[in-house]
Amino acid sequence: MSDLDRQIEQLKRCEPLKESEVKALCLKAMEILVEESNVQRVDAPVTICGDIHGQFYDMKELFKVGGDCPKTNYLFLGDFVDRGFYSVETFLLLLALKVRYPDRITLVRGNHESRQITQVYGFYDECLRKYGSVNVWRYCTDIFDYISLSALIENKIFSVHGGLSPAISTLDQVMEGYKWMFNNQIVTVWSAPNYCYRCGNVAAILELDENLNKQFRVFEAAPQESRGAPAKRPAPDYFL
């Protein structure tokens, strides 16, 4: 098993990587992402996912419903971090999958993939708590600068994190995981069930087949008993 495959399995167990491993992973990801476009072209079939917000165990439910990568071709539309308890493990798992299967997972930047926003909504504090320094936060936020801003599926479907209608002002209006707008010309997909562990909403992913036929798959939050305790700081790379 390669180091990368071992790290993917470790992250799937919600176990944080060492700081040196995070740095190396981010450098590898940077080499891949720098070659992608601001509007990245994506082939169908593809499964589209909305906000995750560090809800790692709910992302595991997403993969149970949608299938594992690389068997399923995924498009994630940003907001990987903040608010949830496991932003580090969530983002690093997606990043590791991107490095391992670059043509089977596409990442789009959300408004929370920002240095300023993450200093307010939790990711900065989580990195500091789990690693004892801001280095991992810096490695990850440097990667944010390289992530595509949007995706174009088969030159027909434009996918982006933002651009919500002013008619949708709260999550209460997307409680079913998705919502059509503008005579079914635009759909919002939300993939964080029971948002912030208290909103009670379900989540959804959108599957497009090779002919761009659509199927929504709705899922609920992971059972409480399946959630581990928030990860502790990993062992240091060396001792003084």
Image: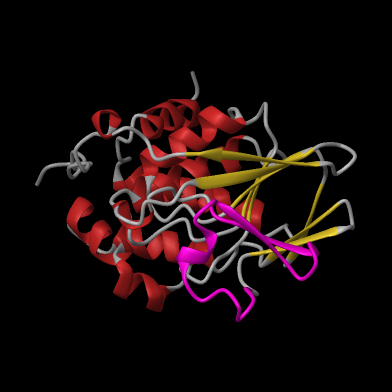
Image x and y of residue 171, in percent: 47, 65
- Residue at image position (42%, 32%) is 7
Kindly identify the residue that appears in the image at 49 percent across and 27 percent down: 5
Span highlighted in magenta in the image: 164-190
Residue furthest to the bottom in view is: 166
Q: Residue at x 84, y 41 (%)?
A: 213
Q: Splitting the image into 4 quarters, where does residue 205 fall?
A: top right
58, 117: nearer the viewer? 58
Looking at the picture, the colour scheme in use is: secondary structure
Total number of numbered discs in the rendering: 0
In reply to whether residue 221 is colored magenta, the answer given is no
The percent coordinates of residue 69 (x first, y second) are 61, 31
- In the picture, measured across the screen, residue 168 lies left or right of residue 216, that is left
Q: Position of residue 183 (x, y in %)?
A: 80, 67
- What x and y, as percent, mark residue 198? 29, 54
Q: Is residue 175 magenta?
A: yes
Residue 37 visible in the snapshot: no
**Does 32 sit left or right of 1 as displayed?**
right
Is residue 194 in sight in this rendering?
yes
114 left or right of 65 in image? left
Using the image as rendered, state which of residue 148 and residue 83 is in the foreground. Answer: 83
Residue most extreme to the top: 1
Q: Residue furthest left?
A: 240
Left or right for 202, reference 224: right
